[in-house]
Image: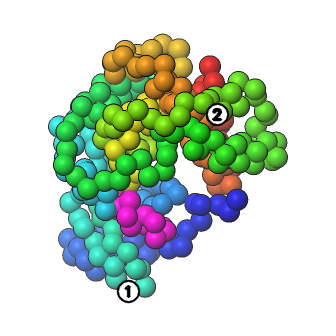
């Protein structure tokens, strides 16, 4: 498999400064700092505004989705990004970009802390999110994240890649989670974040949660798509706290959530290994194990 995170349009500090300065005079000459790089976007802080620049063409559609949804989420119990600066293609950069106020905190995956408070808060957040009734143009689970059978082959591909490199050692319990036979999700789709893993929950150094970021994969889907975080990021009392705050979760939803947790963590572990992100690699390998227990 080729690496889906390879960038067609990398944006560094100099390029971000030029693009932002040309379109937003108030930020011209402001200090620029690279904050994060994901599969789809480069994230840089220009002055006090955090900008997301697509790295691949597919991210342009994902940007459309998050810009359509984010204004509808302002009343949720954790902060979400607030678009305030909408940039247009310019020069040799072919795609729109956008920015908004920085949400304080660091990715959960990067903070060594007790995770119970974060888990409880994100459980309440997801309960509120999944209860929203919104009229917005979004696809229905375009990546089949709520259907383990549709994702099993690609999940095994990621696990095989990790095993071949000696990064992950095969575990029958993990394989059983991936191969669970559940059929298609029940027809009860809700608005979901769509890509909720430990990089997208922000926390303070003491573990207090502050926000949920990166909404490019938002869609309508089985609630298990977001609840997968209970098995990818949490275990023991933290997992119990998240699920208690969320409300009743069926055995079917749990099985779907566990399968997706393995799938996302395997793919992200492969990315972290290629990117030399040792802390994130450790997090996602742990997530694979958490999902099976």
Q: Nearer the viewer, mark 1 or mark 2?
A: 2
> Residue 160 appears in which quarter of the rendering?
top right
Q: What label does residue 91 carry, if any? A: 1
Asked if the residues shown at circle 1 and circle 2 are in contact, with their CB atoms under 8 angstroms apart, the answer is no
Q: Nearer the viewer, residue 290 or 93?
A: 290
Q: Is residue 200 visible?
A: no
Horizontal side of 156 relative to 40 (left or right) equals right
Q: Measured from the top left, where is residue 150 in percent x and y? A: 57, 44
Q: Nearer the viewer, residue 79 or 49?
A: 79
What residue range appears in magenta? 46-63
Residue under the image location 64 percent in, 55 percent down: 275
Q: Measured from the top left, where is residue 244 in percent x and y? A: 37, 15
Horizontal side of 23 relative to 275 (left or right) equals left
> Residue 261 appears in which quarter of the rendering?
top right
Determine crowd level at label 2: few under 14, some 14-19, many 20+ residues with C-alpha closer than 10 A.
many
Disc 1 is placed on an element classified as: loop
Provide the residue designation for mark 2: 178
Where 72 sits versus 23, above or below? above
Residue 125 part of the magenta-drawn span: no
Q: Measured from the top left, where is residue 158 in percent x and y? A: 69, 47
Q: Is residue 133 visible?
A: yes
Q: How is the image coloured?
A: rainbow
Horizontal side of 17 relative to 3 (left or right) equals left
């Amino acid at each position: 498999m080729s690496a889906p995170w390879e960038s067609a349009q990398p944006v560094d500090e100099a390029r971000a400064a030029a693009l932002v300065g040309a379109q937003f005079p108030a930020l011209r000459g402001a200090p620029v700092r690279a904050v994060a790089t994901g599969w789809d976007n480069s994230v840089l802080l220009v002055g006090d505004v955090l900008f997301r620049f697509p790295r691949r063409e597919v991210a342009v559609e994902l940007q459309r989705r998050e810009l359509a949804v984010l204004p509808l989420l302002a009343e949720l119990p954790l902060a979400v990004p607030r678009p305030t600066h909408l940039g247009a293609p310019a020069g040799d950069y072919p795609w729109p970009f956008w920015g908004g106020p920085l949400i304080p905190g660091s990715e959960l995956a990067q903070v060594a802390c007790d995770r119970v408070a974060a888990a409880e808060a994100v459980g309440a957040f997801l309960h509120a999110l999944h209860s929203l009734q919104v009229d917005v143009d979004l696809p229905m689970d375009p990546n089949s994240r709520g259907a383990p059978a549709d994702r099993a082959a690609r999940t095994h591909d990621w696990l095989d890649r990790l095993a071949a490199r000696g990064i992950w050692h095969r575990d029958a319990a993990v394989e059983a989670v991936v191969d669970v036979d559940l059929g298609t999700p029940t027809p009860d789709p809700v608005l979901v974040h769509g890509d909720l893993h430990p990089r997208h929950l922000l926390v303070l150094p003491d573990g207090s949660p502050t926000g949920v970021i990166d909404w490019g994969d938002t869609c309508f889907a089985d609630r298990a798509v977001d609840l997968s975080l209970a098995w990818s990021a949490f275990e023991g009392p933290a997992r119990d706290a998240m699920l208690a705050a969320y409300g009743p979760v069926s055995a079917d939803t749990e099985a779907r959530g566990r399968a997706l947790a393995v799938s996302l963590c395997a793919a992200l572990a492969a990315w972290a290994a290629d990117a030399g992100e040792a802390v994130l690699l450790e997090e996602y390998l742990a997530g694979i194990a958490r999902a099976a227990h």
